[in-house]
Every structure is written in C-alpha cells, then in structure tokens.
Image (spheres, rainbow, N blue to C red):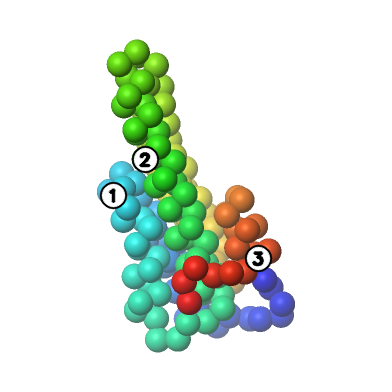
Amino acid sequence: MDSGYQPDAEEMQQAFHAHLFAGLAAILFCGMIFPVGAPLLVMAMAKEKRPFMLYHINQAVIFQAAIFVFNSAMGIVGGILAIFCVGYLLLALIPIAVLGGAIFAFVIGSGAKAGAWNEYPVVGQKVLREWKPAFT
C-alpha cells in the first residue's frame, strides 16, 4: 500500500489508537466482541478518513473479528467435546488467542505510530494486496 504516501502525525496517532484500543479491549473484556468495535470508535471520531488510518483500522477490525470467530468456534466445539474431557484442550486455546491478538495489536500499533505500513499475519496481506476496505 505504501505508494509514496506519507501520513502526518495525527493520522499515525489515530492508527496507533485503533490498534491500542483493540488490544486493550481484548485484554479487558477477554476477547468478546469489543475488540472488533474499538477501532471503529477511532474511525468514528476521526475528522478525515485518510488512507493510512483506514488501512490500519481495516486490519485491526478484520484481525480482531477473525479472533472472535475462532474463539466462538472453539467455545462451541470445546463446550460440546467437554463431555468427553477432550474439549478442555480446545477451551484452553481461547485465552491464548486473546492474548496473542492483544500482543499483535500492540506491536502493529507501535509500528503505526512510527508511520510504518505494518501488517497482521494473513489478514494484513489480504488487506494490502486486494485493498478492498470493509470500512471507509
């Protein structure tokens, strides 16, 4: 996505806050759906929707939504399989995914604060290559 576009300090700060809020919401609310909405709150408060900020907000929302879907699936399947004592292993993956999502959010957010077009694994490459933003 970096085609010579240079974000200003305000845009870098907004991108940083999108990731920071997602990471904090993941930790404070144990995943749930709040980390998905946190970057959208930053977008709603922004005066201008600029490319660098939108790139990072889209990544944060899609990544946190993927973690939410993964955790929901693990919760359902793990809950059913808990009858056979195997499901507890799947349920143990949920806090690991939440913590991993928060750590990724903080790392990518610190790069965004420095003006880097960092990307999340898999999600970032998809957003970067196709650049069909879900939120504009």
Left or right, residue 117 beside residue 12: right
10 Å crowding of disc 2: few (<14), some (14-19), many (20+): some
Q: Give the residue type at disc 1.
A: Leu
Residue at horizontal 36%, vertical 26%? Answer: 78
Give the mark, 3 or 2, whose residue is nearer the N terminus: 2
Percent x, y of residue 72 = 36, 40
Q: Give the residue type at disc 2.
A: Ser
Q: Secondary structure beneath disc 1?
A: helix
As measured in the structure, the alpha-carbon distance from the residue carrying label 2 to the one carrying label 1 is 17 Å
As measured in the structure, the alpha-carbon distance from the residue carrying label 1 to the one carrying label 3 is 32 Å
Percent x, y of residue 84 = 34, 13
**Disc on res. 72:** 2
Percent x, y of residue 95 = 37, 36
Residue at image mark 1: 28
**Disc on res. 130:** 3
Name the quarter where the N terminus is drawn: bottom right
Q: Give the residue type at disc 3.
A: Glu
Q: Who is closer to the viewer here, 11 or 38?
A: 38
10 Å crowding of disc 1: few (<14), some (14-19), many (20+): few
Residue at horizontal 31%, vertical 26%? Answer: 79
**Disc on res. 65:** none
Q: Quadrant of residue 38?
A: bottom left
